[in-house]
Structures are given as structure tokens and as C-alpha cells.
Image (cartoon, helix red, strand yellow):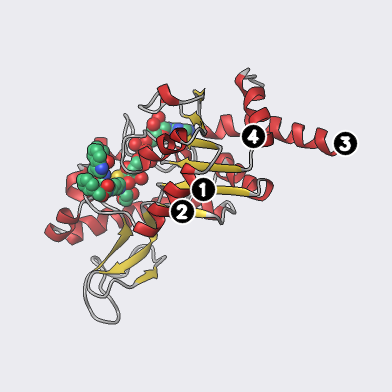
Amino acid sequence: MRKIPEISQLIDILYQTKQIVVLTGAGISAESGIPTFRGEEGLWKQYRAEDLATPIAFIKDPKLVWEWYDWRRGIIASKKPNAGHKILGRWEKIFPNFILITQNIDGLHQKAGSKNILELHGNIWKVRCTEERTITENHDIPLEEIPPHCPDCGALLRPHVVWFGESLSSSVLYKAFQVSSSCEIIFSIGTSAVVQPAASLPLAAAEANAKIVEINPDPTPLTSYADFSFRGKAGEILPLINKELNKKLKDRKE
Ligand code: BJW
């Protein structure tokens, strides 16, 4: 098995850390078979974000936008959490103050057992009434009607996700900055670190003297700020870190 020298240093820090924050992006779900947004295989190579992931696109053509989300819901529904999701689910039980902030809307972290989650960009399994703003769960695959309408008032329903140019939930964002600015270590896993305001969370943590750990096969704008930079897939690197962490925890018990 591959040995990465930095891991033992990271474990020493993790072992003494009380506040851990993990920020995840589409890359953590890539090994589950869910496409990322950017890069050669990313959704934005095939589709234009302006046509599908903005409020203007939805006003212009709600059917087109919903067809795209219906297609993505079909893909996501058939996918399972991978080793990366599962390890983060377990860390929540090991570390007393562990918060997971995700940009992902796929719900795979919850499927892997994570509970303490801040979903920055919403959830693809929720729909929101464009008139009443009520949010409900909807797991229909395919959707019964495209575009779907609110059963109570008949108005259009929209995916409960955050599109470009839209504000994130202020309470979720406030909490995300609060925990990032008070943690001792922040992991940035599987995100290109270009979409704001999520990309600023690790920097807010660093300003408050937290260590930054990045896990990504490719460098990102965050890489030069990272104290630990693991160049690889989340589903490979997280098990390596977890293995060393378990060894250390076992030694402590003995
Ligand atoms: C692996 C891997 C493996 C592969 N293991 N890793 C300040 C400056 C400039 C612009 C702005 C700014 N503030 C706001 C903006 C505008 C905009 C923005 O940031 N634009 C930039 C792109 C320039 N932000 C917004 O509009 C946000 N709203 C906002 O801030 O409101 C106030 C405001 C508005 C306008 C102006 C100013 C203020 C909202 C952003 C909403 C993003 N929405 C989406 C769609 C969600 C719904 C859906 O899924 O349909 O969210 S876009 C898309 O990008 C999605 C993601 O959550 C998000 C981030 O992408 P992510 O997760 O990083 O994925 P990728 O594909 O980019 O990267 C994957 C990474 O994984 C890669 O690095 C791979 O290498 C790696 N990887 N395999 C580990 N196995």
C-alpha cells in the first residue's frame, strides 16, 4: 500500500484537534459515479451553466431546466456512497466537534451516515414552491409532471438548489463561516475551490490560524494556501489517513 510521509504529521495534529471542519465538493462523489461540474468529464463541458443553473434560465425555460434535473436525479438515485463518504460519516462519531459542509446536492453524505451537515447549495431531493416558498421532499423518478407544480397552490415548483447569482441560505452560510473561523483544521475535499462564497471558507479558517488540508487529484487556487496537500482521489487518500488515525487511536487505548 502507498505510504505518504505527510500523513503521520497530519495524524499528530488530528489527534489533538477538537474542532474539525470538512468542506466537500463534487469530486468526493465522482468515485460513486456522479459527474463533477468542471474538468474534461464535467457537466459544464456538455451543458452551459447559463442555460440550466441560473434563475433566468428557469424563468426562460422551466421545462428544459427540470428535464436536466430529472436526468441528474435518475443518475444520483442509482449511486451509493463510496469509501470517502463513509469515512467522513465515521469521523463524526470519533471527533466530538466535527462539522461537514458540503456544496453537493446529492445527499450521499447523509446516506453514508453523516448527520452534522451544512448543505450550502441545497438538495436535489427537495422542491420549492416558487410562490409560497414551501420546501418539500420529492423522490419521484422520473418526475410525474415536467415541470412539476405545487399541489397546494398550483404554482411552479423549482429544485431546492442554489443557482449562480442566487444567495445561499443566510443561516446556513452564517453557520458555515462561524464554524470555519473557529476550527483548528479544515479539509477541502474534491472541490475546484472556484465557486464563491464556499471557496472562501478554508481561507476564513486559515485567517483564524487553522490548518488547511486539501485532497484533490489536481491543484486548485487553494493549493498554495494548504498546509497539507494530498494529490489523489478522496476514495484513496481518506482511507490512508483513516487507517493511520485508527492505529493511533488503538495505541492510545492500549
Ligand atoms: C476529485 C475526484 C476525486 C475529481 N477525489 N477530488 C466573488 C467573486 C467572483 C464571483 C462571485 C463572487 N461571489 C459570488 C460570485 C458569483 C458566483 C461564483 O462564484 N462564480 C464563480 C464561478 C466565478 N457565485 C454565486 O453566484 C453564488 N451566489 C452568491 O454568491 O450570491 C451572492 C452574489 C451573487 C452574484 C455576485 C455576487 C454575490 C451561488 C453559487 C451557486 C453554485 N451552484 C452550483 C449548482 C448547484 C445546483 C446543481 O448542482 O445543479 O453548485 S454550480 C456548481 O459549482 C455546484 C457546485 O456545488 C459548485 C462547486 O463545484 P465543485 O463542487 O467544486 O465541483 P467542480 O466540478 O468544480 O470540481 C470538482 C473537483 O473535484 C475538481 O477540482 C477535481 O479535480 C476534483 N476531483 N475527482 C477528489 N475522486
* Picture quarter with the N terminus: top right
Q: Distance between the residues labelled 2 and 3?
A: 36 Å
Identify the residue shown where x is 65% and y is 49%. Answer: 96
Q: Nearer the viewer, residue 58 or 90?
A: 90
* Picture quarter with the C terminus: top right
In the rendered structure, find residue 118 and report the number of the disc placed on it.
2
- Where is 105 relative to 23, above or below? below
Secondary structure found at label 2 = strand
At which x and y percent is residue 248? 75, 32
Identify the residue shown where x is 17% and y is 45%. Answer: 50
User: Residue tagged by mark 3?
Assistant: 254
User: Dot 2 surroundings within 10 Å: few (below 14), some, or many (20 or more)?
Assistant: some
Secondary structure found at label 1 = strand
At which x and y percent is residue 128? 31, 67
Q: Which amino acid does label 3 sit on?
A: Glu
CB atoms of marks 4 and 1 within 8 Å: no
In the rendered structure, find residue 14 and report the number of the disc placed on it.
4
User: Residue tagged by mark 1?
Assistant: 100
Identify the residue shown where x is 32% and y is 36%. Answer: 42
Q: Nearer the viewer, residue 113 or 168?
A: 168
Q: How far apart are marks 4 and 3 (CA)?
A: 19 Å
Q: In this view, does 164 lie to the left or right of 206?
A: left
Report which quarter residue 49 is drawn in. top left
Q: What residue type is labelled 1?
A: Leu
CB atoms of marks 2 and 1 within 8 Å: yes
In the rendered structure, find residue 220 and report the number of the disc placed on it.
none
Q: Can residue 90 be seen in this snapshot?
A: yes
Secondary structure found at label 4 = helix
